[in-house]
Image: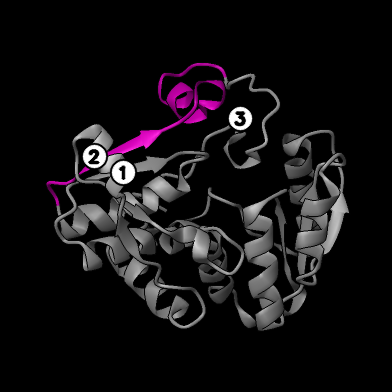
């Protein structure tokens, strides 16, 4: 089904008790500096330190019994890997994660401690992603994409639902964009609850995959960064308005 507010509400029920309903707090110093009333959603309080748990867990709950038994696979060197591994371990679902061969040991270890099978393959994320697609077909695994998946988008959309439930006065959302899954989910929830709210997606200049995709420009060249979550060369291709 297309992404909808009903799908996000259903995701919120699936996540209840397993993912934190994190607080939305006033950013007093930032508000004073900018002359605006600003609030922050504290997703760093999640078990693995990121909102990525939401989409990963919701997608796991959408698996059939047969898919759960065989397991899932994803390409990620960061938060999506840890969120998928953690909740896969909780639910007894085998998880395989493809990471670039040069991934720092600490990131590999953090994911492995949740019981995931780590495959170090490829010189960069694009090559790891290609390997994940290949292994999914060879082993009959379900691919759980970090952002280009409607079930993942619905899980991320629970952030918008929580924020407007806690703070119905919010009128503008500023959302970081990697591949676009977080923004798509939040936009769907926020526009349903407050059609007049504004949504602003932000990217750094070096990794502006979404801006380039919308402008029909080549993917960004990127470069080295400690924040590998933003190092996305190709924005999500799934249109959340349709199958």
Left or right of 35, for residue 128: right
Is residue 106 in view from this perspective?
A: yes
Q: Nearer the viewer, residue 237 or 226?
A: 226
Give the percent coordinates (x, y) of residue 147.
53, 49
**Quadrant including the N terminus:** bottom left
Residue density around tag 1, few if under 14, some if 14–19, many if 20 or more, within 10 Å: few
> Which secondary structure, mark 2?
helix
**Residue 233: image tag:** 3
Q: Does the magenta stretch include residue 170?
A: no
Which residue: 71% across, 77% down? 89
Between the C-alphas of marks 3 and 1, the distance is: 34 Å
Nearest to viewer (mark 2 / mark 3): 2
The disc, 2 or 3, on the residue closer to the chain's N-terminal end is: 2
C-beta proximity under 8 Å, tags 2 and 3: no
Labels 3 and 1 touching (C-beta < 8 A): no
Of label 3 and label 1, which has the lower sequence position?
1
Relative placement, left or right, of 228 versus 243 is: right
What is the number of the mark on residue 29? 1
Label 2 close to label 1 by CB (< 8 Å): yes
The magenta-colored residue range is 195-218
Q: Looking at the rendered structure, which numbered label has been put on residue 164?
A: none
Helix, strand, or loop for circle 3? loop
In-image side of 183 versus 226 (left or right): left
Query: Badge 3, how many Cα within 10 Å: few under 14, some, many 20+?
Result: many
How far apart in space, not on screen, are marks 2 and 1 (Cα)? 5 Å
**Which-is-in-front pick, marks 3 and 1?**
1
Report the residue marked by disc 2.
32
């Amino acid at each position: 089904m297309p992404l909808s507010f009903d799908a996000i509400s259903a995701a919120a029920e699936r996540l209840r008790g397993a993912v934190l309903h994190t607080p939305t707090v006033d950013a007093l110093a930032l508000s004073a500096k900018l002359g605006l009333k600003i609030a922050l959603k504290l997703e760093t309080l999640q078990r693995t330190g990121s909102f990525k748990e939401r989409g990963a867990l919701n997608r796991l709950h959408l698996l059939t019994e047969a898919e759960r038994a065989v397991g899932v696979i994803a390409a990620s060197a960061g938060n999506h890997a840890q969120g998928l591994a953690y909740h896969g371990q909780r639910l007894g679902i085998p998880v395989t994660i493809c990471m670039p061969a040069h991934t720092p040991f600490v990131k590999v270890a953090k994911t492995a401690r949740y019981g995931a099978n780590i495959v170090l393959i490829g010189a960069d994320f694009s090559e790891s992603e290609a390997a994940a697609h290949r292994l999914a077909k060879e082993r009959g695994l379900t691919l759980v994409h970090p952002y280009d998946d409607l079930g993942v988008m619905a899980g991320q959309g629970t952030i918008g639902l929580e924020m407007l439930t806690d703070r119905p006065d919010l009128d503008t959302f500023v959302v970081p964009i990697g591949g676009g899954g977080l923004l798509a989910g939040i936009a769907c929830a926020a526009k349903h609850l407050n059609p007049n709210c504004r949504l602003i997606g932000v990217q750094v200049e070096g990794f502006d995959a979404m801006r380039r995709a919308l402008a029909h420009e080549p993917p960004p060249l990127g470069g080295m960064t400690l924040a590998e979550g933003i190092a996305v060369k190709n924005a999500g291709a799934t249109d959340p308005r349709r199958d």
